[in-house]
Image: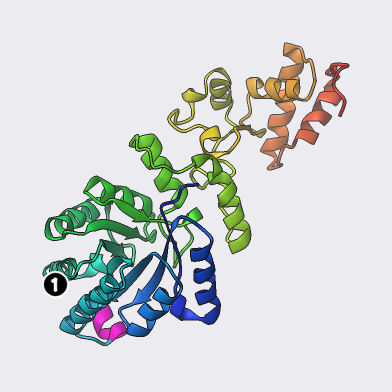
Amino acid sequence: MGTHVIEAGFPVNSDAEFEAVRDIAASTRTTICGLARVVDQDIEAALDTGVEMVHIFVSTSDVQLQDSMHSTREEAKQRAVESVERLVEADVEVMFSPMDATRTDTDYLIEVVEAVSAAGTDWINIPDTCGVATPTRMANLVELVVEHADARIDVHTHDDFGLATANALAGFEAGAEQAQVSVNGIGERAGNAAYEEVVMAAESLYGVDTGIDTTHITAISRMIEDLSEVPVPANKPIVGANAFAHESGIHAAGVIENSDTFEPGVMTPAMVGARRQLVLGKHTGTHSVRERLEEEGFEPTDAEVEEVTRRVKDYGAAKNRVTIADLRRFAKDVGVPRSEEVHV
């Protein structure tokens, strides 16, 4: 699909994860990244997998330093610098994350940013680890880091308040060149910025050529849904079952005439490898019913369309899902003729 970087895993975590990262790194031309704490054992494990990029992280917020890392600010900064220097020496691309950056004292955050920048890191990632940023705050923080770093800027956003994609885009607007995302937004707690949302917003709303082949987005979403066993809600943007579905009579009539009337226009189903659906239910209008009847080979009169539509609405109002089989049954009951050429 043209994805720029794949962070394949945390090699030191287990033998199985080490082998997975190693195998992925050996089997693709995409830049493969391994995750590591600012710990020698982690870094060596990542390097041993053969990845082209290593992403190191250390907590910088006081609450995490005290109650998770059990470390001082100075110790965290020193370990960060030493780890960056080790990776620069190993001649791999380096990304550094001050974990929980959005809850970190700003002066200390800039102190760490300047130190790792001077040590030669290629990327500085700004993680909203606990999902507490707003787009304005995220943009302001990215702008501040850009002013104090020679490295390129990346953002990592969480969706605890439903703002992960918005915060990632705010990061881009403020000077970040990369965002960390996951297909279907899966991740810790409420998840991360969704791959499909960030890519399509960049492509369709900002007019950016990301280099991603977006026509595979729906297919990869379904694959990840199956493998992760995390269901995709029907109303999920871009990839949900209802993303390009229309039930309302006004909406269906509009999209039959011109899909731009009740779809974004700048994003079509074909762009993400999906199909538009005219859903039958209590809000369905005659335009949609006629379209579906004709697709099924029926040749209805206006009066027959009206009667079938009434039955569809009544059936849907009773909280029933109206299927194509139901539509065929209604058409048969009404006596709608079928074309002789159609064989079902």
Q: Is residue 43 magenta?
A: no
Residue at the location (27% across, 87% down)?
70
- Residue 78 is left or right of residue 321, and the answer is left
Work out whether residue 140 or residue 30 is closer to the camera in this orientation and state it.
30
- Image coords of residue 78 (percent x, y): 19, 81
- Image coords of residue 243 (percent x, y): 54, 40
Residue at the location (66% across, 34% down)?
281
Most distant residue in the bottom direction: 70
Work out whether residue 342 or residue 175 is closer to the camera in this orientation and state it.
175
Q: From which residue to which does the magenta span run?
A: 64-69
Q: Is residue 313 visible?
A: yes
The kind of residue on which mark 1 rests is: Tyr
The answer to whether 304 is drawn above or below residue 76 in the figure is: above
- Residue 23 is left or right of residue 36, and the answer is right
- Image coords of residue 90 (percent x, y): 31, 73
- Image coords of residue 88 (percent x, y): 26, 70
Identify the main secondary structure in magenta.
helix
Pointer 1: what residue? Answer: 108
Q: Quadrant of residue 113?
A: bottom left
- Residue 333 is left or right of residue 119, and the answer is right
